[in-house]
Amino acid sequence: MRSSFKRLIACVVVGLVSVAGAVSAADAPPEIPLTIDKNQFQPTEVKVKANTPFVLVITNKSAKAAEFESKDLRVEKVVPAGKTVNVRIRALKPGTYSFLDDFNQQATGRIVAE
Amino acid sequence: MGGTFVITLREGFEAALIMGIVYTYLQKIGAERHYRYATRGGLLGVLASVALGVLVTALSGPLLDLGPDVIGLAVILVAVMVLTWHGYWMQQHARAVKGDVQRRIDEAQASHRLWIIGVLAFTGVFREGAETVLFLWGLLTQATSPSGWASATGAVLGLAMAATLGWAIFRGGRHISLQRFFAVTSVFLLLLAAGMFSTGAGRLEAMGVLPQSSMAWDTSLVLDDHGVVGGFLNGLVGYRARPSLLEAGSYLFYLIVAGALLFRSGPPKPRARAPRGQIPAHAA
């Protein structure tokens, strides 16, 4: 009884791991770098392909935490000082999507999907 | 200085409002002895915020990518449930108020699980808490130059202002009638919960759990939700300048379902719940 329970757990774990592996391997979306430094985003305009998911790789090079926020993309993501955070973004319709650093609102930028 | 003041005021405002409301609420039902539920909930919220702030700084890789999102979603979910339950309860109680003051106070304390107040206080503080901790921490480490000091001072003043507003609600709320207080706060909490529900749906949409939908409207030129006024409205009643159909739909869905639950007309349900041993009857 107990060993079959263990086997079940093992199966579930293996299943989950393989699903996770398959998902990450199957759609490795393009990575788009974005840097926060000297109270600015770099670049301030990010061009992406419309209708294709992508990963924003946000690196905070400044000495204080930043919060990447975009109501248009429904993302609110703290990026601690000196860290890099990956944000998966779903396929976007053609258009402009604004974002800002919620901790330093002069820092703004936009994603242009075309 | 002005910029950081507005940011912490906005982050702290929701927490202050909720804390002001729950303390007033406990005072209204004569449960001053149970302020500790609210106090502990709020303090735990602060502790959890600091802990998450530290954790986020220490984490990296996939944990940092997904961890805060999952926690954020869980907090939103719990907050919506607690707000709905509390609103429903207040509404039931406000309508059932018929007897003498003492009896209704006894009933209130007996039939409402007061620990839910603690959860309400916790989620109210924790929701924007970790962010505020990280923001303040960043400012304080930079407070070596005069402008750094000004920014840090502005941020602290913003939080103090938020706390003052919460206190003002508590002071002012004491003077209005129980029924009016219940009516006003249940409408406000309903809108707050609808906003959170819609935010949660939007997050799930962005994460790919829920299907993607197109934009319902665009009022970003009239009232931007990243701006000062729009930002406050966003936090309080869930205003969005460019919501997706799913977000707008879930807002409406929540308003209709919870609104029907809260405000349907008709005689109050019999509320013959025997006092539970958990909370001792009011000693008069």
Image (cartoon, rainbow, N blue to C red):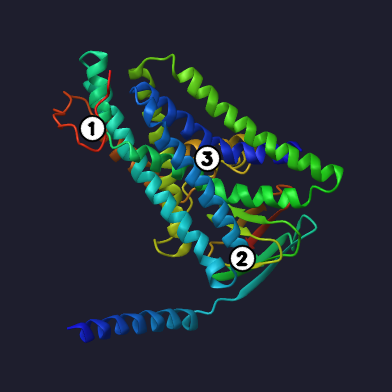
- From the image, state whether disc 2 or disc 3 is nearer to you: 2
Q: Amino acid at mark 3?
A: Gly
Circles 1 and 3 on the same chain: yes
Of the numbered discs in the image, which one, if any, rests on residue B235?
3
Q: Residue furthest front?
A: B283
Whether B222 is drawn above or below B24: the answer is below
The answer for how far apart the CA atoms under marks 2 and 3 are is 28 Å
Describe the element under mark 3 as helix, strand or loop. helix
Judge by depth and name the residue closer to the eye, B224 or A104: A104
Dot 2 or dot 1: first in sequence order is 2
- From the image, state whether disc 1 or disc 3 is nearer to you: 1
Residue B229 in view, yes or no: yes
Quadrant where the C terminus of chain A lies? bottom right
The answer for how far apart the CA atoms under marks 2 and 1 are is 43 Å
Q: In the image, residue B203 lies at what x, y percent?
A: 47, 56
Q: Which residue is mark 1?
A: B111
Q: Amino acid at mark 1?
A: Ser
Please report the residue visible at 49 percent of the width from the left and 48 percent of the height from the top: B243
Q: Amino acid at mark 2?
A: Ala
